[in-house]
Amino acid sequence: MTADALSRLHDVVRGRLPKGEGAARIRARRFLEEGLVDSVQFGEIRYDDGRMWDEAVSRSRSRFVHGFLWFADWPALIRDEETAARRAYELSQEWREQSPLWRGLDGHLAFHDETTAQRLTMHLAVMDGLARWLSPAELEAMHITADETADLLVTDDFHGGLNNHGMFQDVALVNWAGAASWAATEVRERYLRTALDRLARYFRHAFTDEGVHIEHAPNYHLMVARHLQSHLDVLRAVGTSDLDEFEDLLAGTLAYATHAVAPDGLYPLVSDTTRLPLAGAARELGDDSFLYAATQGKQGREPGRRTHVVPASGYAIHRSAWGDPQATFVYFSCAYNGPFHKHADENSLLVRHRGLDLISEAGPNGYSYDEPLTRYGYSQYAHSTLVVDGRSLPRTGGPTSSVTMEVHRDDAGFSVTGRNARLRDEVVHERTVDVDDAATAIDVYDAISAPGRHHYEILWHVGADLEVVLHGQGYELRYGGQKVMDVMWEASTATRVSLRRGAGGSSPKGWRFPTMGHPEPSDVVVVSFEGADVELTTRIRLSDFIYRDRDVTRRAGWRRWTGSEVGVNFLPVPGRRDRLVVAFASTNQVGDFTSNYKPTVDGTGIEARYILDDWGDQGCYYFQDHGDRAIFRSVQDLILDELDQLGLTPMDLVCIGSGKGGTAALLHGLSLGAGEIFVGAPQTRVGSFLREMHPNILRFMTGNVDDRGVGEADRMVFDMATAMSDKWAESKVTIVVGERDHRLLGQVRVFAEHVADLPGTLDVITLPGLTHTDIGPAYRDALAARLTQITGTVHGHGDLTVRAVAGDRRVSAMAIGGAGTQFAARLFQGADHVRSIPYSPSRSIEITDVPPGRYRVRVFARDVDGELLGARTSQWVTVR
């Protein structure tokens, strides 16, 4: 190596050392004027007569202090002002004098491998400026400080190895060889050869064959790529034969560096990444595609692809568009490429959309592993992945081959499977993520296998400023009152969902770290379940949502009760507190969960609770999930809790609903011994009904749709009536059903026969001429009449209701409610009275041989003494 080579190296090193201009110079002056280090990352650090060196703080801040990284702000000020130069000299020598005390302290950052390297580079950065102001003896003392540090870094025993710490040591040695013109040429050359040999080994080792840095964090990938680029300048200066090899290596790193950039121009908070602007680095690297990503399309050239899958490295990335800060960005990781900066984040997913982190990660808290929040940040609990038996994996351990990724599709979106076999007790977690090209539909398939039974948790971290609306097997995210995402899952076993936020103590959970060392409480959706081999499919939608937006939010009055095994969504409506009406909902379309008969109930002024049956994709009769009746028990507990708060008993409870809601009202009302159970057209042989009409509900409730599942669901209402017969012996149970509801009328009759020998009584009101599709309005009117009777708010004819149905040359009518014992009717065509029916005890009125036309029926009610109590007229019906 020639003297010219060292001279050229000197120029390269001077060009890459910190300059300390602009805002950095202002920060440096604050130390001179106020005695504090002004750090962008750590804020104000007071020198405090040297106590700064020994202050008990985080490892990250100790590294910053003992690495003299704050000297990066000082070069320009030292160059121009003697006061600054003398203060820098004093601080350096003060540190050197105390350093023997720190050298023997286990774990102290003063002689940490990478910290020591940074300290040498920072001293070299100010050396030229110090030469203008210091005496020869003082300058020699500074040279000795630098030389001693270089002597330490060159030794193999102190070297950090094939990782970025070792790289920083060797970069510092190259800097010293280029800048230490005061040192012997032979020593400089020897140290340089050592550093270049070690750097060559490191750079060859540092990236996968797909060009991804093995230390897991995108910002470390970029940092090492930039050092590789700077290393190329060194190689050109000194002249080596491996220049072409490392130029090709650098080119290969740029694809991941580009695709890992989120739409906001920053790297996502994965692994030990910190979110910092990338445009400057992109300009230095000179890659137009990276510059386009880093500047959100303002500069550079748009990359040719929106999908980047590197399965051997363990990453799959897709975005809906380049150059759009609102674009959707999906980042899936199942990587274990080495031990450094490794988090327990296998199979973790991140989704950013419309500038929001919808599925996120906690990010890093720092490097002080003795701090609970730092341990949390490395743990599985800080990532959107699977946790087994309530214990996170250690961040490293086991062979790297136990974590793999297989690609199924990598164009127009991606489909990949990550496999994590690092889990305890031979548990294996495979997660397949499928993303469409528009990135609005993301499907996640989790397959867990184990030789024995375990407790599992799948975590979904929620970004800042988002409102979470939990459902039974899913959740919605809202931002500013508008829905931005919903999630629904289907599992092979029962699942429960909860929300975790800001739990403290020695095992904190539910936190995020927007910047290192600054924790904020954060929402985490936790899906928990038990089993050995379990499969779970999760649908994530950013448009064409699964859940119909019913605004089930706290702002709209909804509450989520979490006082039992599973959470329950309900809407409380205050009213008269002598009774409590609990309304159960009927079946709607998949994903549409709402309440029924609210205007009718609210119109009576009675205290009411509307409970959502939002389990599964279409409800579960408020009863069970794959045979687990935690749902039933939790709804029961909610109702009892509400009664207790109102000072009421179950005899003051009124359970209502029709269809599925009617069945649920029977199940819960019978079990609680409700004073009143008033239902319309319930399914009592639930399994037989569901197999024909809603097999998805049957599968959710029982786990299958075969004869065993049908039989289990067919028995549940009958078994409940028998098992709880002592509870509902004093209950008033009424079923309203249509005469022509052929599917359900038989079920109601079979149930009535079943309970005939039980202590309680059941009244069945059969509405003439009504089919199942007619029951809604008829039940609503009957319910209004019955609730009016219960409350006693209206007397006489006010609680009488009449429903009419037109058939084949006939009109049928039913008198509902009212206190009458005998009923008569008149048939009107338009304004003309065309037929009369005399008084009889029957509430059912049949008028035959009716010619085509438009009719209504007026019914008269009287008591046993013949006194007229009132009259009511039906709606119009048409005989065709």
Image (cartoon, rainbow, N blue to C red):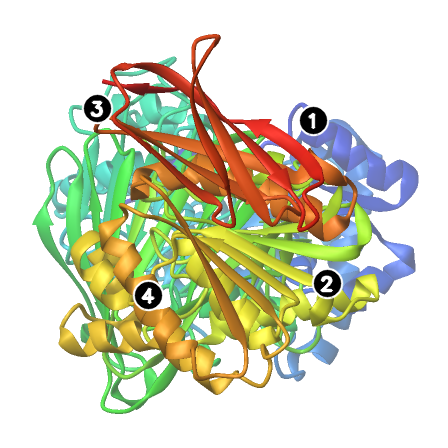
Numbered disc in front, either 4 or 3: 4
Classify residue 452 as left or right of residue 483: left
Please name the residue shown 18% across and 79% down the image: 708
Please name the residue shown 67% across and 78% down the image: 506
Q: Are marks 3 and 2 in contact (CB under 8 Å)?
A: no
Q: Which residue is mark 4?
A: 749
Q: Which residue is mark 1?
A: 23
The type of residue carrying mark 3 is Pro
Q: Are marks 4 and 3 in contact (CB under 8 Å)?
A: no
Q: Which residue is mark 3?
A: 303
Question: Where's residue 158, x and y in %?
Answer: 46, 75
Q: CA distance from mark 1 to mark 4?
A: 85 Å
Question: Where's residue 433, x and y in %?
Answer: 22, 52
Q: Which residue is mark 2?
A: 642
Numbered disc in front, either 1 or 4: 4
Instruction: Between residue 740 and residue 75, name the one nearer to us.
Output: 740
